[in-house]
Amino acid sequence: MTRMSGRRAVMGAMAALALAGPARAQGRPVRLVVPYGPGGGPDVFARRLAQGLAARLGSPVVVDNRPGATTMLGTEYVAGAVPDGLTLLMGTSTTFAANPHLFRRVGYSIAQFQPITLLIRTRLALYANTDLPANDMAGVVALAKAAPQPLAYGITARGNSTHLTGEALKLAAGIELVDVPYRTTGSMQQGIIRNDIPLAVDGIPAWLGLTREGRVKVIGVTGDSRVGALPDTPTFAEAGLRDLGHQHWYGLLAPAGLPAPVLARLHAATVATMADAELWQNLTHEGATIETNTPERFTALIAEETETWGRVIRQIGLSLE
């Protein structure tokens, strides 16, 4: 055992003693690292999760936004943290299932993490500037095919679910589009409102206000059924487009070496939080599906999803550096 790993093990064991009893754990802040910027769908979800966890752990849970490098910056930060249960990662399918296929060098591996539980599977949508002369998928496809230059579409990062969905859309529709990465959902929203870009692919919760106010149009949604919050918006499948990638997911992880009592307590608190129907009623209305599992099953799921996303990425032919 190296000196560093030994130090991490000792600190993890000390954390197990501190966190095993609820009374002793109260007041110890927990950092929930979110590898996305503030204001977007992942951030909205993370803040609700933090609220529920804080109530059940008896400790403050602080959301720490660390966006950049297709979720890799925040993920690498947590990979190097002490496994004491006080630093957690809201990981995604992008982080663990897509990035290993997209980049030759990834500064972390799943072996550096202790999966706790799957949280949700989410939906994406295609948005358009209100001046775009197309109101449905058929119109967007026709416009793209007639355009002298490829239409631009906004994404929140190259290689993440917004980008992969856009690339899959190009293949399914037989059109050319060019991606424009934005650092945050908020900046991408401003870009589409100003008509810097005509289209954007992103999650649903952070865009509902704009669509209801008529400041942005929504063209279509991923998934097999319509979203309750957007009942008049068809799915891409309804528009005749198939194979738009695998469904995106979020899960909770900690640094590897987490003591068993701490893992058990975090898992129980998270599962109870995700079972809180009142906390998540808007989320499910917005198209998300809540799904928790055991640490062992989540570990197996990550391995399965890595293979699934690998097939999608190879079909698209996408590689990033």
Image: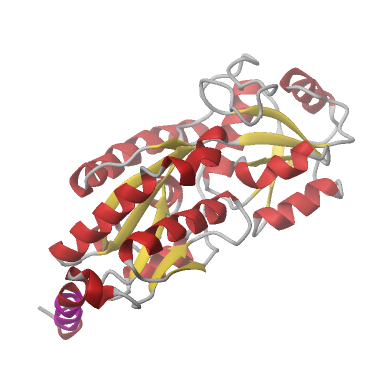
Q: Is residue 205 left or right of residue 11?
A: right
Residue 190's x, y, as percent? Answer: 79, 53
The quadrant of the picture occupied by the N terminus is bottom left
Whether residue 225 appears in this view of the structure is: yes
| Residue found at the very far left of the displayed protein | 1
Say if 103 sits above or below 177 in the image.
below
- The residues colored magenta run 5-15
Q: Residue at x 58, y 18 (%)?
A: 237
Of 311 and 42, nearer the camera is 42
Q: Residue at x 44, y 55 (%)?
A: 49
Say if 32 sits above or below 297 in the image.
below
Residue 8 colored magenta? yes
Of 220 and 317, nearer the camera is 220
Residue 160's x, y, as percent? Answer: 52, 47
Magenta segment main secondary structure: helix
Residue 85's x, y, as percent? Answer: 28, 69
Q: Is residue 317 left or right of residue 254?
A: right
Q: Residue at x 47, y 30 (%)?
A: 315
Of 63 and 304, nearer the camera is 63
Colour mapping: secondary structure
Of 306 and 50, nearer the camera is 50
Q: Is residue 25 left or right of residue 165?
A: left
Residue 264 colored magenta? no
